[in-house]
Image (cartoon, rainbow, N blue to C red):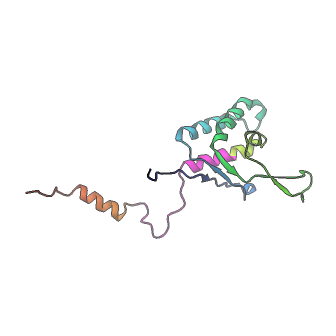
Amino acid sequence: MGKGYRRAPVKLVFSDPELDGFNVWIKRVSIGRVMGLMELAEQVDVADPANSREQIQALLDSLYPCLVAWNLEDPEDPFDDDSPAVPVPLTPEALRDQDVALVMAIVEGMTQASGGVADPLERSSNGGGPSETLMALQSLEHSPEPSTS
């Protein structure tokens, strides 16, 4: 069987400096899934999460299957700043144990990653114009058919 396109996991990037060093990898998700997550996230009252229990649970249920891995750590002793860090396994329960702000940051990161926001083009790029190969193919499309006589 030939090689097909394999969708590699996407590493989320967070703009919040508090999340510096926190990495989350997600599956590439459909536009429909992203739109559904966005709708659910908009229904969550971040200021009063207790009044959004059903929406939060629906958001977690929809979000968890998209997650591949994370490097989340908690201190072994939450009251000791010098306590060693312990990895938090990626499970539905662990996701549910996180604060609303972290979950919303993951959803926002997914939305940005799925929107295809790319890094700036390199200097050698033509700025998004057609490549020479593409232009050559297009010129072949419009060339007269060779005669067979």
47 or 128: nearer the eye?
128
Report the front residue among 119 and 3.
3
Q: Image quadrant of residue 141?
A: bottom left
| Start-end of magenta stretch | 105-128
Is 8 on the left-hand or right-hand side of 60? left
Q: Residue at x 92, y 55 (%)?
A: 80
Residue 95, percent across and down? Answer: 74, 42
- Residue 118, percent from left and from top: 53, 57
Residue 45 against residue 101 in the figure, above or below: above
Between 121 and 93, the one nearer to me in the picture: 93
Which of these two is toward me, 16 or 53?
A: 53
Relative to 17, 149 lies left or right: left
- Residue 21 figure quarter: bottom right
Residue 14 location in percent, x, y? 67, 54
Looking at the image, which residue is at 73% across and 31% down?
Answer: 52
Task: Indicate yes or no whether the magenta region holds residue 121.
Answer: yes
Q: Residue at x 56, y 44 (%)?
A: 29
Hey, which residue is sitting farthest front in the picture?
A: 1
